[in-house]
Image (cartoon, helix red, strand yellow):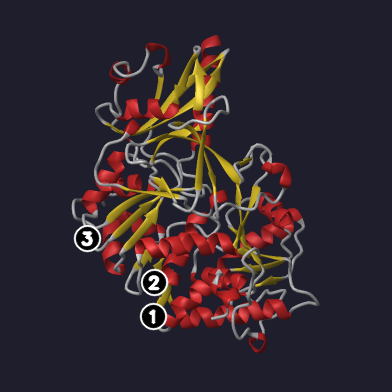
């Protein structure tokens, strides 16, 4: 294989194609596409796009959900050898337009279900770009689908070229673009190949949206091994064990929030998911209780908690859970990949050996944000390395790995006392009847007020406060508790803490107004 292709994500797919040409590459929406079918369709799309116009695009946006044509669209974008920008059709048109402009997208590939989003983009933002739909897709194409222009093979790329751009939330309300190079992904997946040894017989879940970095884990761990990718439809969560058995899933990956949903549907019965051999969770903190419940339901699966900001290429550390309890009853995030350097900074910015903000340097680190202004305060040059300041606080564990303490900005002052929100979460989880808890801090006069949202049984307020007082100082014991059947989730299937904070602030304002009347 051409080494300039072998290092790319396209090259990983070609590995799977060589191993499993007529095996299923993806099953979604009742449709199965083999490796050969997916490859040939992607070649036609990529060739048609490159043949259109006088010069190739600078960046290609892929507007796609998770229907079968979405995978053709994404692979076609990568096959062009041009920077690919995954975009989600459910996002507000203005936000999507901001991403398109920031990334310099000048052509789009859209899946079958994205026509309403495309129409909205044109109507609401005046977007006018050439658009191509996959074979058999919508007839309204601005770029002609030309089978005669099909590529013979994916286009090559250099290690330093940008493979894809993903966007994270920005503190200014403007999404921040994170470029990820072919060198970043090649290093990452080489480590995973060595660690996990996935094979053609594996069947992966694909729970993450394609614009979320963990979705790349699903696709290219599976496709690099010639394995099958299966997209669980929303209704599968009514009986996930049945879906897993019917599809023969062997590898599961999701945010921990999926555990709560499957539990509510009665899916965490002991031994209910015997086909799973590996279970991965990432994207938010994983509680030991959730890990234990999942492990009981999938008794033959090795369970790992993965951690990693988008800026460090998907995941950068892993902890294999064996049933132990840990700080704040949360599963550790484990050891950082051995090819990277770690630095801890305390609250004063001084180096620490045991606890502080986690800073990481190494081959998975992004070259920097699309807008250099976003780099300010997020990168540090020291000892000949360029570190990324994650904003996450950790403590060294006895095994040399890392215990997650929470976000650097998750420390708040309440009545002059510094509070770690994760500590409050853990105290409430320890109350009888409580399943899970999320604490948010909202302004209340000259101080901050803690509001706890919890799931499980509805527990009387006097009982909650009485139990929490046993482990927390009186000054920081929350006075407001809100029972929910389930936590709201954002587009990445993580607990939507921002929505909970807004709800807490609004309810607090309503109470104060009512009290003043």
Asked whether the beta carbons under mark 1 and mark 2 sit within 8 Å of each other, the answer is yes
Specify few, some or many for label 2: CA neighbours under 10 Å numbering under 14, 14-19, or 20 or more. many
Q: Secondary structure at mark 1?
A: loop
Residue drawn at (35%, 18%), measured in percent from left and top?
472
Q: Residue 336 in the image: x percent, y percent?
A: 44, 47
Say whether residue 135 is visible.
no
Give above or below for 136 relative to 99: below
Residue corresponding to mark 2: 228
Q: Which mark is residue 23?
A: 1
Q: Nearer the viewer, residue 65 or 86?
A: 86
Q: Which mark is residue 274?
A: 3
Specify few, some or many for label 1: CA neighbours under 10 Å numbering under 14, 14-19, or 20 or more. many
Q: Residue 158 in the image: x percent, y percent?
A: 64, 69
Q: Residue 446 in the image: x percent, y percent?
A: 58, 12
Asked whether the beta carbons under mark 2 and mark 3 sit within 8 Å of each other, the answer is no
Chain-order first, disc 3 or disc 1: 1
């Amino acid at each position: 294989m051409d080494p300039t292709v072998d290092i790319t994500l396209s090259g990983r797919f070609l590995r799977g194609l060589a191993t499993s040409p007529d095996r299923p590459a993806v099953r979604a929406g009742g449709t199965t596409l083999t490796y050969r079918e997916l490859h040939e369709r992607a070649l036609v799309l990529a060739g048609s796009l490159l043949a259109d116009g006088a010069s190739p695009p600078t960046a290609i946006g892929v507007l796609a959900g998770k229907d079968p044509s979405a995978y053709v669209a994404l692979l076609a974008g990568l096959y062009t050898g041009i920077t690919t920008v995954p975009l989600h059709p459910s996002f507000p048109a203005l936000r999507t337009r901001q991403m398109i402009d920031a990334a310099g997208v000048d052509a789009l590939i859209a899946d079958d279900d994205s026509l309403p989003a495309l129409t909205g983009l044109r109507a609401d933002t005046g977007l006018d770009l050439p658009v191509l739909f996959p074979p058999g897709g919508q007839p309204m194409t601005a770029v002609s689908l030309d089978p005669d222009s099909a590529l013979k093979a994916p286009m090559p790329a250099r290690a330093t070229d940008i493979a894809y751009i993903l966007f994270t939330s920005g503190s200014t309300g403007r999404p921040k673009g994170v470029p990820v190079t072919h060198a970043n992904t090649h290093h990452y997946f080489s480590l995973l190949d060595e660690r996990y040894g996935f094979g053609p017989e594996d069947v992966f879940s694909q729970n993450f949206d394609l614009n979320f970095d963990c979705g790349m884990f699903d696709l290219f761990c599976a496709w690099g091994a010639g394995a099958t990718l299966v997209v669980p439809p929303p209704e599968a969560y009514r009986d996930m064990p049945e879906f897993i058995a019917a599809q023969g899933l062997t590898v599961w990956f999701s945010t921990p929030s999926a555990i709560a949903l499957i539990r509510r549907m009665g899916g965490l019965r002991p031994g209910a998911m015997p086909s799973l051999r590996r279970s991965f969770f990432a994207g938010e903190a994983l509680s030991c209780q959730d890990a234990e419940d999942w492990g009981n339901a999938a008794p033959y699966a090795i369970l790992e908690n993965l951690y990693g900001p988008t800026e460090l290429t998907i995941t950068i550390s892993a902890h294999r859970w064996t049933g132990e309890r840990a700080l704040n009853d949360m599963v550790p995030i484990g050891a950082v990949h051995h090819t990277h350097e770690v630095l801890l900074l305390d609250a004063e910015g001084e180096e620490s050996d045991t606890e502080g903000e986690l800073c990481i340097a190494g081959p998975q680190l992004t070259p920097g944000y699309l807008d250099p202004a976003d780099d300010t305060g997020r990168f540090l040059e020291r000892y000949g390395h360029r570190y990324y300041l994650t904003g996450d606080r950790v403590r060294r564990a006895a095994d040399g790995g890392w215990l997650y303490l929470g976000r650097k900005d998750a420390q708040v002052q309440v009545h002059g006392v510094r509070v770690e929100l994760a500590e409050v979460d853990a105290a409430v989880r320890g109350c009888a009847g409580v399943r899970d808890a999320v604490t948010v801090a909202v302004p209340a006069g000259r101080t901050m007020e803690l509001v706890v949202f919890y799931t499980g049984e509805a527990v009387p307020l006097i009982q909650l406060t009485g139990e929490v007082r046993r482990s927390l100082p009186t000054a920081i014991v929350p006075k407001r508790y809100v029972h929910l059947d389930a936590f709201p989730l954002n587009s990445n299937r993580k607990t939507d803490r921002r929505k909970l904070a807004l709800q807490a602030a609004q309810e607090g304002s309503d109470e104060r107004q009512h009290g003043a009347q």
